[in-house]
Image: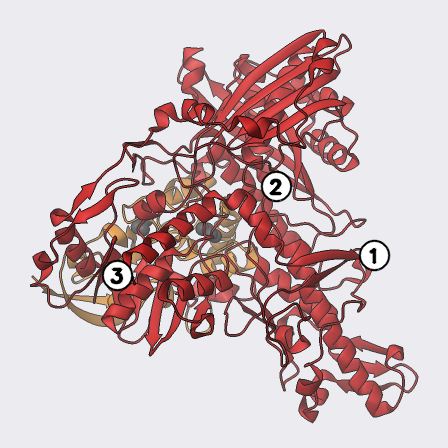
Chain colours: A orange, B red
Amino acid sequence: MDATVIFTVNGQKTTVITDPRRSLLDVLREDLHLTGAKYGCGEGRCGACSVIMDGRRVLSCITPVGEANGKTIRTIEGLADGDSLHPVQEAFLEVGAMQCGYCASGMILTATALLERNPNPTDEEIVKEMNVNLCRCNGYTKILQAVRRAAEKIRR
Amino acid sequence: MTEETLVKITESQRCEPSGGLTGDMKLSRRCFVQIVGAGLLVTVMEGPSLGRGGGRGRASMTVAARVRLNTDGTFAVMTGKVEEGQGSRAQLTQAAAEELQVPADRVHLIMADTALVPDDGITAGSRTTPSTVPAVRQGAATARELLKGLAAKRWKLDGSTLKVQNGVITNAATKETISYTDLAKAGEVEELFQQGISSDVAVMNVSEWDVLGTSVPRPNGRDLVTGAHRYPSDIIRPNMLFGKILRPPSYGATLESIDLSSVADMKDVVVVRDGQFVGCAAATSFRAAQAVEALAKTASWKTVPHPSSKELFSHLKEHARTGDRSRPGNKVSVEKGLSEADKVLSATYEAAYIQHVPMEPRAAVAEWSGDKLTVWAGADWPQRVQRDLAGAFNIPAERVRAIVPDMGGGFGGKHSAEAAEEAARLAKAAGRPVSARWTRAEEFTWAYFRPAAVIECKAGLDANGRITAWDFATINPGGAAADTPYAIADKSIASVGTDSPLAQGPYRCLGATVNNFARESFMDELAAAAGADPLAFRLAHLDNPRIRRVLETVAKHFDWPARRKKVTAELGVGLACGTEKNSVVAACVEVEIDREQGGIKVREVCEAFECGPIQNPANLTSQVQGCIIMGLGGALSEEIQFENGKILNAGFSEYRVPRFSNVPKIDVHLIDNRDIPSAGGGETPIIAVAPAIGNAIFAATGVRIRSMPMRGLLLKQA
Ligand code: FES
Ligand code: FES
């Protein structure tokens, strides 16, 4: 049975009438054409689908869209401010912290949510927060470097 | 399409990767590569040339098929290679910019679109660097010379006296200049570029490089961090539907009956059955999946027996083709060397099937317009996708356009484009574009695997600790890096075929990952038997100066002699080296052992790598770091388990790939060897990782683990 779900995506109030059991990821990608959030596993084990919901990172593949009702969601498409990139995006670009880049949107949003809470994380804190995020190009070394650099930029 | 043709296609898709071990070599021969003089590689294309007067045959490609000058003085450069994270987009952009003598941002690279680009062969085997980079450089260098010729004609002088810099041609004598932009506006260039690419044009010497050899970032990097780039799974077309396919419950199962009327009330769903193919398309993937689930409940299948991973190694041995051991080229007897030996050692190594697990599973969008088909697919060779689809739908290849958008990883695992055909079937029936995207479980089950292996090693040592004979038979993974780089007079190397229970195909460095594991582990066993230091033992048997250099480099940076002395039961160090695809690698690692818990933690990897002149240092560093960490997975945790034709661990919770918390301290040393042509660097750095870890475990514990993945559990039992 379809339901009406109303949420704010990247500052825009959005109404979707759909089966509320569908994943938030599917609705973002298939209905709203926000394809920046990626599918990697569908079981909450890779972080590719990460988005920020009410300030916290959520795994949109295991979040039924019904649960997003009334929430505020930020996706990678809404992170930059017009032409100027978010510091985390900037840092990823400067460090070259992507090979195929498929994991990048999930990595960047996870790091953003972390740094908004804790702008001065230790390496252990970064690893703990980001451990669900997989990079199969195995670019972890540079991703870690990028998150550290982003933290510096945000503190500045 | 009849069921018969369908079966054939399915078979050819399954068999191709299986035969890919040799098949890929065949494929790479589509390009005839010859060495002409000072390291200049010439690639002659087979197949149709895009330029005027092209057509079938081996005519050399026109400049226009490779390079176009835009009126704003920028260039479009075309290549059939795909970008899947290995860095080819930046590298080929640099190659063209170098020869055109413009900054990299004035070259726009068009990749992997059969309507626009020449066929550069499959993206595999580290061939972009040794084959495509030279082909692009040659095309761009010819273009540069033609443009100089045009300027010379205007000035009525000899073109050889002109210099180009930053897109501006200068007459040194008169200081007159003319830019590419000016020439583009004159309108003669298009005609000029209809000429063939010159096979003897001079390319820039390594010592003159100013774009190649620098860390040009990925040209579309910004689109990757903003989410703007559309990967194959992100392509959206007007009116598009989403598809799901009914999969057999087990390998080899055939569909006997299914009740399509069970979904008759789902009026919004397009249902297709064509022989064994059953799929649904709907406005959402959720809806399509619901329909497929409903259909699955009504399907009855005929299943066949299938071996399980528990009996994998005995299966591989039992089915080994005995004739392969005595194939011409394999020396069958090492009796002389063994009889002269003081000690004879033998050991059998094993490796499980593992999977590439690219972050983006297979995905494709197909769109028909009349009898013309366009697909956007994640696959390694657009022209093969085009040919396969033309064959599947019985239409001329010209009516199929295959585009490979920069995709989310491959590592050798995306040579086949099953999703493209699935999307095309559904799209044809629906009369609307369809996106077919595999789930992770589908990718784990219906893609193909890195070959499993059983490797039998035997060697003799004389009283001085020198190897007198070497017998190496590798069953199943193919011959990559099977031969030993060590100087051993009496040796026999055999690559033995067998029956592979799972569909297998290329992987990062393919069989070299396991052949090198066996050899470098066994070398360590021999060093221990000879009472020698593993580094000294290797160097004593190595003539190859390039391997010696990486080995000595890594030993120095790791401080091998001192750290080897400090080994305890909890802290081991190990090293390994190897060569493949004309590049060389050596690694030292430190592992921490918790014997009681069966814990193995890699704390540090130091690796030296050399692949000729470095074309993009930052990208090469990423590739080496990526190989090292990917290598940890195969070494310690990755293993496909199967039973009754089903994969038992088709998800990230059961199949463990490296995560942030597994990342050791990594120290990479790249050697820029400018005396030889560049080789590819995205594969070989993986081959030293597993054996170095195994050797470090042995150093600490005295336990030799001979099976990949090396499970810490074995330390508890030993
Ligand atoms: S797709 Fe959501 S965690 Fe993997
Ligand atoms: S960059 Fe390819 S998965 Fe992370």
Mark 1 or mark 2: name the one nearer the start of the chain.
1
The residue at which mark 1 appears reads as B38
Q: Position of residue A45 (x, y in %)?
A: 32, 43
Is B479 positioned to the left or the right of B634 in the image? right
Q: What's the residue at 66%, 19% (across, down)?
A: B564
Task: From the image, state whether disc 3 or disc 2 is nearer to you.
Answer: 3
Give the percent coordinates (x, y) of residue B114: 50, 70
Identify the subunit bearing mark 3.
Answer: B
- CA gap between label 3 and label 1 equals 53 Å
**Residue B243, numbered label:** 3
The structure residue drawn at horizontal position 67% and vertical position 16%, both measured from the top left corner, is B527
Image quarter of the N terminus of chain B: bottom left
Q: Height in image: B528 above or below B636?
A: above
Task: Tell me the residue that label 2 is attached to.
Answer: B684
Is B6 placed above or below B256 here?
below
Q: Amino acid at mark 1?
A: Ala
Label 3 secondary element = strand
Give the x, y percent position of residue B333: 67, 19
- C-alpha span from label 3 to label 2: 38 Å
- Circle 1 chain: B
Expressed as whole percent of the image width and height from the top left, the position of residue B169 reads 80, 81
Q: Chain of mark 2?
A: B
